[in-house]
Amino acid sequence: MIEKLTNNIKESLKKLDIDFNDILVERPSKKENGDYASNIALKLTKLLKEDPMKIAEKIKNNINNDCIEKIEIVKPGFINFFLNKKYLYENIDEVIKLGSDYGRNNLCEGKNYNVEFVSANPTGILHLGNARGGAYGDSLARILRFSGAKVTEEYYVNDAGNQINNLGLSIQARYFELLNRESHMPENGYYGKEIIAIAKNLYEKYQDTLVDKDIEFYKEIGINELLGKIKKVLKDYRINFDVYTSERSIIANTNMKSMLDTMGKNGYTYKKDGALWLKSSELGDSKDHVLIKNDGLYTYLVPDIAYHVNKIKRGFTNLIDVLGTDHHGYVARLKGSLQALGYDRNILDVKLLQLVRLVKDNVEVKMSKRSGNAVSLQELLEEVGINATRYFFTMRSLDTQMDFDLEMAKKTSNENPVYYISYAYARICTILAKAPTLENVAEYLSLNDEYAYNVLEKVYEFPNVVKQASLKQLPHLITNYVYDLANSFHIYYSKNRIITDNKAETMERLRLITAVKITLKNALDLIGVIPPEKM
RNA sequence: GUUCACAUAGCUCAAUUGGAUAGAGUGCUUCCCUCCGAAGGAAGAGGUUGCAGGUUCAAGUCCUGUUGUGAACACCA
């Protein structure tokens, strides 16, 4: 409908001989302002130097559309469209026909996205902080797919470098502890429970036969065990990564030297103090950074650049990285590096999410993998529930700093909005289970009160909400929408009986709530929530 | 010190190319089950959008300054 009205306005402008393309048609927040509205006349005041009310009037007189019942011009110059309800009734049949495809669009057709998220180092288990990025990344991937894109969800495993070394040393130290041998935790060691558990397992299986194993052995054990745990909890969280890429494989399969040579040839590197530097300050960063240290080793930046090049070479047209704001300094470096290699820096889009703070009794609890006092994602899923957790974290936009109180979350889990939505869904399922089989209806005569219209309009809106969410890459638009849809249904339900003595009426209403059910399910699927048929 | 985010109802948050009277939930005060699920519905109170300027037909949204909160500023990753 938005496209239709936009075209109507476009044609109207053509007739008036006005050349202007920035036409916006949207749903007004207030009902009395019509089903759809446009601010086009206000936008044209400057260009035409004319009273917006007069411009609006002219545009109105040149619009032809059989869905429009009435057009109102309201000061300061809005054009408000009131539609007849035919399109809403037709949409019921459309929703039922399309089923799980209702809301799908082809906005992103031809695009090949790589969405990289979570990517937590395998030096511990996943915690609360990873839940937010996980929910965002996966929901975004689902939305982009629903909009016709090809999407790969990817996890980057940092299995090389100092941290993994420390992991190996930490496991070894815990193992030695159990053998009552002298042991030292490394300086940046990992103190989490899961590390102790790994050591305990080793001890129970092998007793003291592993004392002569070198550090590589403990590293391997640690990575395998922890990555296994991470994968399992992600699966529980309904995130299925298509690809796990290991840093080691990137290092092994990339010719770093030739990559750095290319950057040099393009004039973006220089030598100073025995090190090789990237001129990142010329590429949008605040300062230059070292690529090769004076001891000849690469800094972390080099494999990271190689990894992103690797993604580009795999044929992705759009790269999305979901990172915490603590990595914000890293964005300019990475995009600059891609530019230095001759790629379009805008192929990479980095989504920064504000970190979640863990709060207990109004006091912040510092979470860290090293100290091991973080709330694990697994614990969160067990205590709060998968649906509630996913809903909770996709409810907010990424840029709100949020506090999370586990005690509170447990206490209020029954008041979580996700239950409001589940309840709507379960209600519909119960009614449908009792009702006669769905039949076609020729005409919708009984769905003519404002409550029914509200429901119908919400259902009708869904495909457009999906488009907005995928265009703006904001999954929380879906979350907010689902709540509104459930709300409109609850109100309708409280005002109207669905199953009555009148068979025709009953069938119309059953079709209405079936459309709601389908829409709810499709929308919730985009944010990884599975509504229950019974509660 | 420099840079980047964030600040909206008592609390948690919406309002996204600048649009119409800033909305929900929660908490508080009331009302509604003879009836398909009351985990629901209806009503009320609650706001100088941190503060001060500016831009314009129009600012929570853009700009400048300022205060507060968080984060980043290694030849660590």
Image: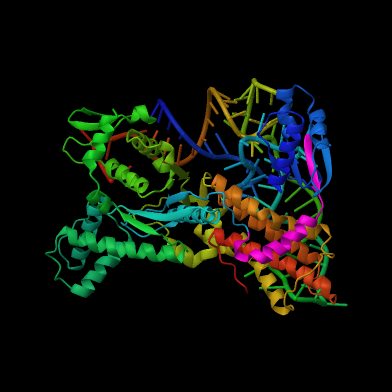
Locate the C terminus of chain A by quadrant.
Answer: bottom right
A245 or A341: nearer the viewer: A341
Quarter residue A9 falls in: top right
Q: Could one spot residue A255 in this view of the protein?
A: yes
| Picture coordinates of residue A218, whole percent (x, y) | 21, 61
A396 or A78: nearer the viewer: A78
Q: Is residue A482 above or below residue B74?
A: below
**Magenta-colored span:** A78-102
Q: Could you tell me what secondary structure mostly forms the magenta stretch?
A: helix
Is B26 displayed left or right of A116 in the figure? right
Determine the residue positioned at 60% across, 55% down: A479
Q: Could one spot residue A286 in this view of the protein?
A: no
Is B19 displayed left or right of A131 in the figure? right
Determine the residue positioned at 34% across, 36% down: A337
| Picture coordinates of residue A513, whole percent (x, y) | 72, 67
| Picture coordinates of residue A229, whole percent (x, y) | 35, 65
Is A147 displayed left or right of A374 in the figure? right
Coloring basis for residues: rainbow
Quarter residue B41 falls in: bottom right
Q: Is residue A252 above or below residue B72?
A: below
A10 or A409: nearer the viewer: A10
Q: Is residue A81 above or below residue A339?
A: below
Exactly how many numbered labels are in the figure? 0
Residue farthest left in this picture:
A212
| Picture coordinates of residue A523, whole percent (x, y) | 60, 59
Q: Is residue A195 above or below residue B7?
A: below
Q: Is residue A53 magenta?
A: no
